[in-house]
């Protein structure tokens, strides 16, 4: 067998896994791999990011739209440590990414060599799995294992650290597909639990379905709709579940959580049976867990066994894949309607609209509101764009007011809440879904956390649309200081640069929008533009996001003002 | 409560670190620790770890340990 270098074996292994895109940044300890990549320019698109954190988030965005693991590749030491936030983000949100890091030679490990960092030691707690390769011959098997682990079961980030000598070393490349088998935990009581869950739902007077990211991760959107339609169940989404069910669906009741909708939170404590699937009862969803749905029987379905009974003790805890489970339970569900119960949602929804929503969506005077921007974007794109939101008030407003009609249309950092996520994630999303309209909605604070990725957008000629909702503040922190810290506004005001001049520097067409009359025409120009486009929109500086479950309060203590 | 964890795993570098990391997250101290390869052909190691932990956390912790890719089996018992 002909011998090839470890670097070439890595390329062949990545192609075997179907990799067509790598987000990366070269450097000393990964140079043999970059040299091999030079020969694969036609089959693998390498996207040169401007900071390694951007590579990790871009890989996440890519994964969300492609359904495949995103791949990022960086050098040792600072290159690898810069990935850590992105890896932790992917861990929190169960996003499959494969990170490849260069490492100093095996002989230099542990000597504080130039650009040496103990990467495995650093990333172990924030990866699903990680491995250091010191022999080239290990590469085909380890790459196969990495992709399998990242994308099976509860998905997540994995990292492969490859010493420089292993990249140079010659090895025989074994092309036979490596079968990877991981342990599986089979629940002997599964069939019984399935029947009990169906019986409980069939006898419920006020059933309530909660769904999360697990729906899109297992591509169970159709099965979810069939299930709720069969039982006539009202359903509500977590932040990451958004767009897994069309917002216009009559059984879609809105978003759960701290800044979710009024009815879905309030009525959590009125339901008699809660069916939660592909979600993990995050503290932002539950509020005070001692007062979370004490009246309800809870059915919890999750692909991760360790999530069952972690936060909320379920009456029926089922370890299963969302898609498979929904396909199995739907035939057991009786066709019913729950008009009176759904009427309670509608009533509270009207209250929310009157107190909060109408004023935010249709302000008649004063500065532009974040909500009206999102409303107009939603109307103009008919709810069909991919919204990539960063973290903060603009994220909650995007989640609340964009009218998602298609699946895989909302990409945001949920669990970790990583500011700076959206700009690089939108790069990955646009590359994975070039035909979809990708709109990044970003606050002025978040935008400056990974602003350098404008360079990547320029170089790759990506048609990413960027909306900065600019309130000159760290708005969410400012809101908390107003409500819970006696208006002591501690370091939340931002003196911002001229974002239009910055966009000019990157040759990205842009506009500044300060007046309401200019908003809709500017959004039209942005959406009509062939390439990337940036709008810096000045919005009200002291807007608060409501409804809100105050920290530590119960879900039914959600406030409208 | 005093518990003994018995964990079987692939005999691979970093597994102890991953398990110890799960204990550290909850600020659990290790009272005693023993690790030995028990199957030379399959490269299986057996960890025996003694910890103090309140009962309601134990079931959650063992599932998180069981979730570790390298771990093939994890169980716990209460010390008298």
Image: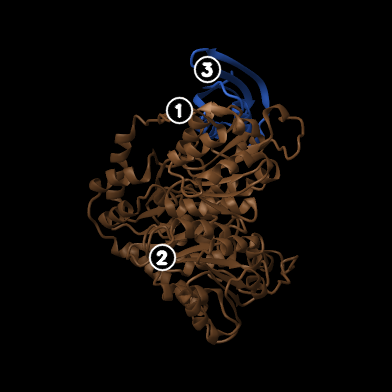
Chain colours: A brown, B blue
Q: Distance from label 1 to label 2 (Cα)?
A: 46 Å
Local secondary structure at mark 3: loop
Could you tell which of marks 1 and 2 lies nearer the N-terminus? 1
User: Residue beneath label 1, please?
Assistant: A174
Q: Is residue B36 above or below residue A416?
A: above
Do marks 1 and 2 share a chain?
A: yes
Q: Which mark is residue A404?
A: 2
Q: Position of residue B27 (x, y in %)?
A: 67, 35
Local packing at callout 2 (Cα closer than 10 Å; few below 14, some 14-19, many 20+) is many
User: Residue beneath label 3, please?
Assistant: B43
Q: Is residue A58 above or below residue A347?
A: above
Tell which of A235 and A29 is nearer to you: A29
Local packing at callout 3 (Cα closer than 10 Å; few below 14, some 14-19, many 20+) is few
Q: Decide: marks 2, 3 in contact (CB < 8 A)?
A: no
Local secondary structure at mark 1: loop
Local secondary structure at mark 2: loop
Q: Decide: marks 1, 2 in contact (CB < 8 A)?
A: no
Do marks 2 and 3 share a chain?
A: no
In the rendered structure, the residue with mark 3 lies on which chain?
B
| Residue A253 can be seen in this image | yes
Q: Is residue A234 above or below residue B34?
A: below
Q: Decide: marks 3, 1 in contact (CB < 8 A)?
A: no
In the rendered structure, the residue with mark 2 lies on which chain?
A
In the rendered structure, the residue with mark 1 lies on which chain?
A
Local packing at callout 1 (Cα closer than 10 Å; few below 14, some 14-19, many 20+) is some
């Amino acid at each position: 067998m002909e011998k090839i270098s470890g670097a070439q074996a890595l390329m062949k292994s990545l192609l075997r896994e179907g990799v067509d895109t790598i987000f990366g940044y070269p450097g000393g300890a990964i140079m043999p791999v970059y040299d091999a990549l030079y020969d694969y320019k036609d089959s693998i698109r390498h996207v040169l990011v401007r900071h390694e954190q951007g590579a990790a988030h871009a890989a996440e965005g890519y994964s969300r739209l492609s359904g495949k693991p995103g791949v990022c590749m960086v050098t040792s030491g600072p290159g690898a440590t810069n990935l850590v936030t992105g890896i932790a983000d992917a861990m929190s949100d169960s996003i499959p990414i494969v990170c490849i890091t260069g490492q100093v030679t095996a002989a230099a490990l542990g000597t504080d060599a130039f650009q040496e960092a103990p990467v495995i030691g650093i990333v172990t707690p924030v990866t699903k799995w990680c491995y250091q390769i010191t022999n080239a011959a290990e590469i085909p098997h380890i790459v196969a294992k990495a992709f399998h682990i990242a994308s099976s079961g509860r998905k997540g980030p994995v990292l492969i650290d490859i010493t420089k000598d292993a990249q140079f070393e010659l090895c025989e490349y074994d092309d036979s597909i490596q079968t990877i088998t991981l342990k599986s935990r089979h629940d002997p009581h599964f069939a019984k639990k399935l029947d009990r869950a169906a019986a409980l739902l069939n006898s419920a007077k006020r059933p309530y379905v909660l769904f999360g990211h697990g729906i899109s991760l297992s591509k169970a959107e159709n099965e979810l709709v069939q299930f709720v339609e069969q039982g006539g169940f009202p359903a509500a989404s977590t932040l990451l579940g958004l767009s897994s069910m069309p917002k216009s669906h009559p059984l879609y009741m809105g978003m759960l959580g701290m800044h979710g909708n009024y009815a879905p939170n309030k009525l959590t404590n009125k339901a008699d049976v809660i069916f939660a699937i592909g979600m993990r009862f995050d503290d932002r969803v539950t509020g005070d867990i001692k007062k979370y749905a004490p009246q309800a029987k809870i059915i919890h379905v999750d692909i991760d066994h360790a999530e069952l009974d972690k936060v909320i003790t379920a009456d029926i805890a089922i370890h299963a894949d969302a898609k498979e489970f929904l396909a199995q339970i739907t035939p057991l569900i009786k066709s019913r309607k729950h008009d009176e119960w759904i009427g309670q949602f509608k009533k509270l929804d009207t209250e929310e609209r009157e107190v909060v929503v109408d004023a935010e969506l249709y302000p008649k005077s004063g500065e532009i509101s974040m909500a009206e921007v999102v409303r107009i974007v939603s109307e103009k794109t008919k709810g069909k764009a991919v919204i990539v939101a960063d973290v903060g008030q603009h994220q909650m407003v995007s989640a609340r007011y964009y009218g998602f009609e298609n699946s895989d249309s909302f990409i945001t950092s949920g669990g970790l809440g990583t500011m700076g996520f959206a700009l690089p994630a939108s790069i990955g999303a646009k590359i994975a879904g070039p035909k979809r309209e990708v709109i990044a909605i970003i606050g002025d604070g978040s935008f400056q956390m990974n602003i350098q990725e404008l360079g990547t957008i320029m170089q790759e000629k990506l048609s990413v649309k960027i909306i900065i909702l600019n309130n000159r503040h760290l708005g969410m922190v400012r809101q908390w200081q107003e409500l819970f810290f006696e208006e002591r506004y501690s370091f939340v005001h931002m003196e911002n640069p001229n974002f239009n001049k910055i966009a000019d520097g990157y040759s990205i067409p842009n506009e500044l929008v300060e007046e309401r009359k200019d908003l809709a025409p500017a959004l039209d120009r942005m959406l009509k533009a062939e390439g990337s486009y940036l709008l810096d929109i000045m919005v009200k500086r002291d807007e608060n996001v409501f409804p809100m479950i105050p920290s530590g309060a119960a879900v039914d203590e959600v406030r409208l003002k | 409560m005093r518990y003994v964890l018995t964990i079987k795993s692939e005999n691979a570098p970093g597994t102890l670190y991953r398990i110890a990391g799960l204990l550290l997250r909850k600020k659990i101290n290790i009272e005693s620790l023993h690790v030995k390869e028990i199957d030379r052909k399959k490269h299986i190691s057996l960890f025996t770890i003694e910890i103090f932990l309140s009962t309601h956390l134990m079931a959650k912790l063992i599932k998180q340990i069981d979730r570790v890719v390298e771990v093939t089996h994890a169980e716990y018992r209460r010390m008298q």
